[in-house]
């Protein structure tokens, strides 16, 4: 693909140069009358041909140079065949098989710490000296007693029940009921004397509601037309505007697509047909837009006129309604409505009276409970005073000693801090129980080892550390990994990093590549094999993807199976990301 691109660039440059020479030649031909000497004419044409060929060579050379600078620079290594010893290598933190947490069952002050992390201790050694801790406990107890006494004194200030608000509500409800009775009586008299006026009033109310709904629909439709958003428009008023707008937008999209095709055709040099189609789509777009805008203007004018008529009629009807209601002391309510209002007011008044009675009963019970709470609070204060006296009488220090021999892994408190019941003050690793090391490895590698295998300790500075595989467990974090558990012996301590290596087997392989040459994606593992192609301007190199399967690995290399042999070169590094089929350039030391 890159060859085709480069040849296309050279072809365009050649055609451009030929066109330039042709224009100059035509210009010379047009001034033929000025140049009568044939020898001079041939000399000019010869000079132009030399300039043309020189320009062609320069363009060809520089286009190839620019192209090479844009390519990814890579490093390669040759695929080899031979022996490979597969190894498992990993690291982890050494852990003690057993540990002991030092803790106490009460809150005390840390007066002295006799240990530090990494220190050896024996059974019976004094680890901490704890103070009584009574100062803070005593202060807390005194604060608690003061808070209880404050609550008790607040209870003594309990105000008596007040029903002023409820009585006022009942009074207001009674007055509302009297007013409702007056309106009911007035409405009854008005109903008897002016039934025709009431019928007109009801008709006006219905017409006002209808006109108001029509006005809202007309207003929302006009707003929709102004914003070109017909979501809230009434369908009976919007007409076919939605369809005309859709036709215009469709024509707009067709024109945009035709214009993109035209631009592409211009680049390829054959744009006549695309231009005609683009112009046709443009006329269709303009026509659709004109039809939409014309229809929108017409409908909006009509709806505006109808909205004005509706608002005028609504004002007239509202004036009649207001006039009727002003002349009717019942507030425009019918006798039936007034009777319903009286019933509602009566029920409201009755409910308020019932609620007041319930509240008074509830407050009576609450008063009795209040007396019980007051007695309970007084008893609690007396008990707290007794506890405070006992706390003041007790004060002594305490020694915390080790129950076992071992090495201090961590100290979790500082001097003058307060201990918490059950929270470890320190952790001691028990040396006699031994140590272990957990290493996570791929599941495929874990299948190749067995319990009892001895591993080499790489960072074994003392020289006597030994690691023996004791267990193989499934990993909790990843289904594709497993955990190897090694028993560690020798001069080691907990919480130190240890690196191990386990030799598996040695075998002959036909294709061995560096680990840095192996990549993976959702389709599996692969390498980039270097493929060369001879051209008139020299060799060109391409990255070819070759799917592989890793058979065995050591620290640096992996044996793979796939379409590779020991005459191939694979890419191990590149200056920028590449994909299969990309053209690349080699570092000078990697030329093949």
Image (cartoon, grey):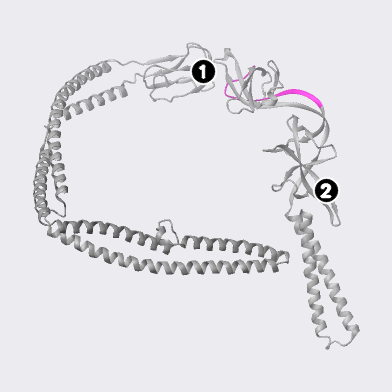
Instruction: Determine if the magenta segment contains residue 498.
Output: yes
- Disc 1 marks which residue? 428
Q: Are marks 1 and 2 in contact (CB under 8 Å)?
A: no
* Residue toward you, 579 or 538: 579
As measured in the structure, the alpha-carbon distance from the residue carrying label 1 to the one carrying label 2 is: 65 Å
In this view of the protein, can residue 64 be seen by the observer?
no
Give coordinates of residue 264: x percent, y percent. 68, 62
Residue pictured at 18% horizontal, 26% vertical: 152
Give coordinates of residue 149: x percent, y percent. 19, 26
- Disc 2 marks which residue? 532
Against 46, is 236 above or below? Answer: above
In the displayed structure image, the side of residue 101 where residue 23 appears, left or right = right
* Residue toward you, 357 or 431: 357
Mark 1 Cα within 10 Å, few/some/many (few <14, many 20+)?
many
Q: Quadrant of residue 572?
A: top right
Q: Which residues are magenta?
A: 489-507
């Amino acid at each position: 693909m890159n060859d085709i691109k480069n040849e296309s660039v050279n072809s365009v440059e050649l055609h451009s140069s030929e066109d330039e020479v042709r224009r100059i030649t035509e210009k010379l031909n047009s001034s033929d009358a000025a140049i009568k000497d044939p020898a001079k004419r041939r000399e000019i044409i010869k000079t132009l041909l030399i300039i043309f060929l020189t320009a062609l060579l320069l363009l060809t050379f520089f286009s190839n140079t620019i192209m090479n600078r844009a390519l990814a620079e890579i490093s390669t290594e040759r695929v080899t065949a031979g022996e490979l010893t597969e190894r498992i290598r990993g690291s982890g933190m050494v852990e003690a098989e057993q540990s002991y947490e030092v803790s106490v069952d009460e809150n005390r002050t840390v007066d002295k710490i006799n240990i530090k992390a990494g220190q050896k201790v024996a059974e019976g050694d004094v680890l901490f000296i704890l103070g009584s801790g009574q100062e803070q406990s005593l202060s807390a107890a005194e604060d608690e007693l003061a808070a209880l006494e404050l609550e008790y004194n607040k209870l003594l200030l309990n105000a008596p029940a007040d029903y002023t608000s409820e009585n006022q509500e009942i009074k207001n409800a009674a007055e509302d009921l009297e007013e409702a009775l007056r309106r009911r009586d007035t409405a009854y008299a008005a109903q008897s004397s002016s039934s025709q006026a009431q019928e007109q009033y009801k008709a006006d109310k219905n017409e006002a509601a209808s006109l108001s709904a029509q006005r809202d629909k007309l207003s929302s439709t006009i707003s929709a037309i102004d914003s070109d958003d017909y979501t809230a428009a009434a369908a009976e008023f919007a007409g076919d505007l939605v369809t005309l707008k859709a036709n215009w937008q469709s024509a707009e999209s067709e024109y945009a697509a035709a214009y993109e095709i035209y631009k592409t055709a211009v680049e390829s040099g054959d744009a006549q047909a695309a231009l005609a189609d683009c112009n046709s789509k443009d006329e269709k777009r303009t026509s659709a837009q004109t039809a939409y805008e014309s229809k929108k203007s017409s409908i909006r004018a009509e709806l505006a006129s109808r909205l004005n008529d509706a608002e005028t009629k609504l004002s007239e009807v509202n004036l009649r309604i207001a006039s009727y209601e002003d002349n009717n002391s019942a507030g425009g309510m019918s006798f039936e409505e007034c009777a319903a209002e009286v019933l509602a007011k009566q029920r409201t008044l009755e409910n308020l009276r019932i609620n007041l009675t319930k509240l008074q009963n509830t407050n009576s019970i609450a008063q009795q409970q209040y007396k019980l709470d007051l007695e309970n609070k007084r008893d609690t204060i007396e008990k707290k005073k007794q506890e405070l006296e006992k706390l003041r009488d007790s004060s002594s220090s305490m020694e915390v000693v080790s129950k076992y021999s071992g090495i201090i892994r961590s100290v979790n408190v500082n001097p003058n801090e307060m201990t918490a019941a059950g929270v470890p003050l320190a952790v001691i690793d028990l040396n006699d129980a031994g140590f272990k090391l957990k290493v996570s490895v791929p599941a495929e590698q874990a299948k190749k080892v067995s319990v009892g295998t001895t591993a080499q300790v790489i960072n074994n500075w003392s020289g006597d550390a030994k690691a023996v595989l004791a267990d193989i467990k499934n990993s909790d974090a990843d289904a594709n990994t497993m955990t190897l558990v090694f028993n560690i012996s020798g001069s080691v301590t907990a919480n130190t990093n240890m690196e191990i290596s386990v030799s598996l087997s040695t075998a002959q392989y036909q294709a061995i590549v560096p680990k840095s040459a192996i990549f993976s994606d959702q389709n599996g593992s692969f390498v980039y094999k270097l493929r060369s192609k001879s051209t008139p301007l020299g060799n060109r190199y391409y990255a070819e993807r070759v799917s592989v399967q890793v058979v065995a690995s050591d620290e640096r290399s992996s044996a793979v199976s796939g379409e590779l042999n020991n005459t191939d070169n694979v890419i191990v590094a590149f200056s920028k990301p590449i994909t299969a089929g990309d053209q690349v350039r080699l570092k000078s030391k990697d030329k093949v």
